[in-house]
Amino acid sequence: MSSLTALILAAGYGSRIADVTTNPKSLLTIKEKTLMDWHFDSLAAVGVKDVVVVTGYKREVLEEYLQKFKSNFNLAFAVNDDYKVKGNTYSLFFGLEKVETDFLLFDADLIYETQILRAFVEDTNPNQILVGESSIDDIECAKTMIDKDGFVRMTIDKRAVSAEEREKYTFAGEAIGILKFSKEYRDDMFNECKKFLADEKNVSKNWEHVMNEFLHTHDMSVHQSVSDKWVEIDNREDYERAKKLFGEV
């Protein structure tokens, strides 16, 4: 059994996929399984038993659905009730309050092959970002930028990489949305979140912003995904692609 805790951020509304579902996005189904089912099946396969899920939007619906996992997992909930105002840095902060060990951080709106997570967990490096193939010119992707020693120093999402950034760093791929932290780095990230959120202008910002602050002073390595069978589901197009990739259509 793994000593890692899984922390899954699932508080958001998912406005870009509201034309597909009004339920929490993590309850979207692919091959008759919700995204949460896919997460928990993979966690069981790699021996992770301790799970914290951060809920918010329609939390009663999601928490009720997840009750079925309590027989096989040590399941706890953290809540971001003010999810429309407080971005998912707050979700991360609230979740970390319930994590006391090395941990895996997941965006809930992912689907991936179990072998991707297994290889990531089996990698003995305790502080890593899971990265897949992509293009530095893809505006939408979370572009992972590494220094000359191979450590991630920033991720760039929803905008182009500047000439200065291209000169300073090397593109390593797309951050999939799964990260691994040691207990020491967990404590540092908790304190970084607290400091970041003390500034009112950061209240609504997503956790990638605080992560970039953290990466200035902490060495996170890249773990290249062993498979390209993964999708982050932000909108209908992503959802259709995930269904096709995982054999539903």
Image (spheres, rainbow, N blue to C red):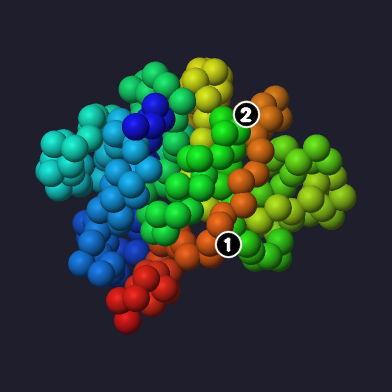
* 149 sits to left or right of 153: right
* 129 sits to left or right of 249: right
Give the residue at mark 2. 214
Residue drawn at (66%, 49%) of the image: 144
Q: Which quadrant of the view contains residue 141?
A: bottom right
Q: Quadrant of the C terminus?
A: bottom left
Q: Which of 181 and 55 is in front in this view?
A: 181
Q: Nearer the viewer, residue 107 or 51?
A: 51
Give the residue at mark 1. 140
Where residue 217 sits: x, y (%)?
70, 25
How would you rate the neighbour count of disc 2 (Cα within 10 Å): few for under 14, some for 14-19, many for 20 or more?
many
Q: Quadrant of the N terminus?
A: top left
Whether 121 is drawn above or below 158: the answer is above
Amino acid marked by disc 1: Glu
* 14 sits to left or right of 225: left
Where residue 128 sits: x, y (%)?
59, 38
Where residue 104 sits: x, y (%)?
44, 36
Q: Which quadrant of the view contains residue 132?
A: bottom right
Q: How far apart are marks 1 and 2 (CA)?
A: 22 Å
* 22 sits to left or right of 236: left
Q: At numbered mark 1, what does the secondary structure look like: helix, strand or loop?
A: loop
> Residue 192 has which mark?
none
Q: Nearer the viewer, residue 243 or 236?
A: 243
